[in-house]
Image (cartoon, rainbow, N blue to C red):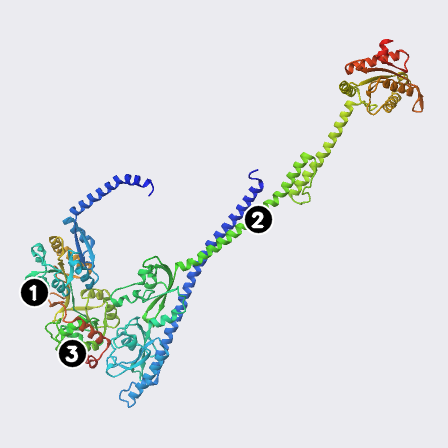
Amino acid sequence: MLYGIRFRLGVLLAAFGVLATGLTGLYSYTESRTLLVRAAERDLMTATQVFGKRLSTVVHNISDDVRVLAELQLTRSVGDADSAAFEVNRAALADNFKSLLQASPQYFQVRLISAAEHGLELVRVDRDGPGTVRVSGDRLQEKGHFPYVFRTLQLARGEVFLSKIGINHELGAHAGLNQPTLQVASPVVMADGRKLGLIVISVDVNRVFGELKADLPSYLQLFLSNEWGDFLIHPDASQTYGFDQGRRVLIQDSFAELQPLLQGNAQQLLARADLGATEPNPLLGAFIKLPLGRAADHSFVVLGIAEPLSEILESTRILGRTTAQIVVAFSAIAIVLAVFASRLVTRPLNQMTREVKRFSSEHAIGELPTQRRDEIGELARGFDEMQLRIKSYLAEIYASRNHLAHVARHDTLTGLPNRTVFLDRLEHAIVTARRRGSVLAVLFIDLDRFKEINDTYGHATGDKTLILVASILKMSVREVDTVARLHGDEFVILLEAMDDEQDARRVAQTLIDRFAEQLRINDRSFELGLSIGISFYPRDGADASELIQRADEAMYLSKHLAGNRYSVFENATKE
Amino acid sequence: MTPAAPRQQRRAGPWRWLVAVAFAMSGWGSAHAIETLRVRAWPGYADADIVKVFEQRHNVAVRVSIVSSDESLWERISANEGGDFDLFAVNTAELKRYVDAGLAVPLTLANIPNIATQLPRFRDRQAIPNIARNGQVYAVPYTYSEMGLIYDKAQVSEPPTSISALWDPRYKGRVLAFDTSGHNFSIAALSLGKRNPFQIDDASYQQVVDHLVALRRNVLTFYSLPEESVELFRDHKAALLFANYGTQQVQQLRKAGADIGYVIPREGALAWLDCWTVTRGAKNKKLAEAWIDYMLERQVSHALTERQGLANTVEASDSAVGSAKIIWLEPVEDVNRRAELWSRIVSGDRPMALGRH
């Protein structure tokens, strides 16, 4: 039994367990992975939208600052250059601008620009290093040819213009020079509807995005492009503002899927790109179109937050590892359970096997799991019943065999050994006597008047007579001597290990004396009388049949002499 | 080393020989059968189909590399003393330094018979700067673009005749000029009647600068890209446009639905002119000259105009150019000085601030 049922059942159960765990693990891994990637996509999109909302809020707040300044009475008071208070008002407004710059580190410049004099700056405060500087006198510049001036002057009171984000090359801009800048402007309208000019705040784009970006996890990458796709923010700063150096570095060249966003028929998109310069670094990004400025301008930027695919897949890798661990753990449990279950099933089977084996060798009924209320219990009960039945059959068989053996060797009426047994014992005794050189005697006995009893009182009485005779004969000899009934009223006695022939004569005489008395059978008295013939070994014969023959002849001699006597064969031949 | 290694080496022997011989034969064959012409040109100058005809006709291979900027062209041609290319296309202003450096070599005009089919303007080698020196011809004109004036027919009844129209107060706030230092100084000099717009003397500088401030005060804005100019022209109802990109802008504006006219002012229009030039390192000068001759064939030159919107030198332009005065670009007296001043002017500095520097 190299691979017994226990092993095979165990392997089968374990295989089922492992397979089920494995498949469940695989399924849950692929499902969870899809969910994770989707969740990552959703998170990215949410992050981008939140970022966009915050950016819009920032732009909104800047617009509010511009509007507030444009509405100040102080601002309007600068409109009258002939007024005595002109310089005082300009200085006061400059102080206001200065305060605003100090409070708002994301502003490069705050200016009041005249609608007249080719867009001459009336009040200008620039950020310069850690502080601010008021630009005045000859250093004030004419800005009328800049879009943020001539386009803002076309707007109504309270409307705000947002320039395209670009590099500010306006010489003398101090901290803002050659920096990415957004100009936010609103017209200053006098009470009579005349446009005095405009308030312009130059916004430090990098600072605004730097502050917004500070809240993003470091592995997220921020992208910003203008409405044509030119990168304004890119993890690699050299890829930004390419148009400023006469080349175009476009977002749609990196993220080809963004084309619909730029062409106006999509508001948000997921896109992939590989920005790895030396080694692959695939990214997944969520991009939204963010309107910038007045709706009428249809101006927008594309904002995107991207995450390295490796970052997203890292979590699925962890998921995979956890799933694998769970699968392994549960497989181990399944294997242990399989071993246990197979033992549970095979232990009673083994017990029964053992008991059945023992039964077949020892016919002993051992303990079987008959108490179980399952198929095994049923089987055990079946075994038990079968064992009991077999046992009872066997008992019967043994009994009848013993009986048959007894019957074969004994006389059924008297219970004395029959002729076969007698011959057997006689031959045995002859062998023993020959070896020892001892003497044995065969007494052949015939009842003298049995026929009369049988004829007179019937066979039943005859049988009882024979039984009584047998018991008397048996009681009259030693234990070692054998009394047998040959047939009818003929009995033989084997006397072994005698000291001499006289012993046999004494036994014969004792028997004759005994039967000379009346026998009582069924309240009747009978006088039977015996005729006995005696032969001796080795004197009268060398084998059993010869000895019996001689004893028989001697008996006939006794009978012939009117019975109730014994004759020795020697005597018989002599007489 | 394992015992098997020498056996493998022995077995590899015949193979290596075979491969080596095959390589040697193929290399030997191609080196002698197919000659390669190395051309460096601007985008659109040598399209694949055009190149193929030349290759078949001369049974040679042509390798075209694309130029991205004047500076990169100079770097690539001057590297290895011109040995990396057989010929290249360069504008007349840039050509000077190649001739000065000896990177361009004189041409044998007899090998370029199609020169005879060029318009007279391009055969006048005295009028075109730098292509001829000491009786030797160094370059053959191929394509050009002049910078005329575009006007809105609805707002401008009489076509402007002078470059000074850009300064005309009638068009204040409706003029679009180009954001560049070099050309703007040149047109200001032309407007002021200077004889050579590329050489402004010190005495005239303040005058030109003031004139550019005046231009700034008269324009709506300065544009950079042709698409941008079209948008501004349309959205802000501009009346006058200095067409830095010439006929390209004319085409784009007309496509955008603008009813415009295009004129060359009487002072002349600045124009860049790209010429074919053979390098000192040319392997087969005759083949290079054959290329130039091929470029001047009518259908090849016509393809350039048709595909790129650039004027060629063998067909009369359908624009307003005609026989009008064209001023081919030349190197200017001081590129850096013009650039530095221009960035101050365009930033909005007033004359009093500019005068101090």
> Which image quadrant: the N terminus of chain A?
top right
> Which quadrant of the figure contains the C terminus of chain A?
top right
Name the amino acid type tagged 2: Leu
Compare residues B143 and A398 and report the one nearer the observer. A398
Secondary structure at badge 1 equals: loop
Judging by the rendered image, the residue that carries numbered circle 1 is: B126
Q: Earlier in the sequence, mark 1 or mark 3?
A: 1
Res B125 visible: yes
Q: Residue at x 24, y 42 (%)?
A: B19
- Label 1 to label 2: alpha-carbon separation: 103 Å
Asked if A14 appears above or below A466 in the picture, the reply is below
At label 2, counting other C-alpha atoms closer than 10 Å, the crowd grade (few under 14, some 14-19, many 20 or more) is: some
Instruction: Provide residue A294's location: percent of width, then percent of height.
Output: 34, 72
Give yes or no for contact between labels 1 and 3 (Cβ–Cβ under 8 Å): no
A19 relative to A231 in the view: left or right: right
Of residues A366 and B324, the one nearer the viewer is A366
- Type of the residue with mark 1: Gln
| Circle on res. A337 | 2
Cβ atoms at labels 3 and 2 below 8 Å apart? no
Q: Amino acid at mark 3?
A: Gln
Question: Residue A369 at what x, y percent from top left?
Answer: 67, 43
**In the rendered image, which residue does mark 3 sit on?**
B206
Front tag of 1 and 3: 3
Q: Residue at x 70, y 35 (%)?
A: A363
Question: How far, Cα to Cα, is label 1 from label 3?
Answer: 31 Å
Q: Are marks 3 and 2 on the same chain?
A: no
Q: Hey, which quadrant is residue A535 in on the image?
A: top right
Mark 3 vs mark 2: give the one in front. 2
Find the distance from the CA under tag 3 to the CA under tag 2: 100 Å
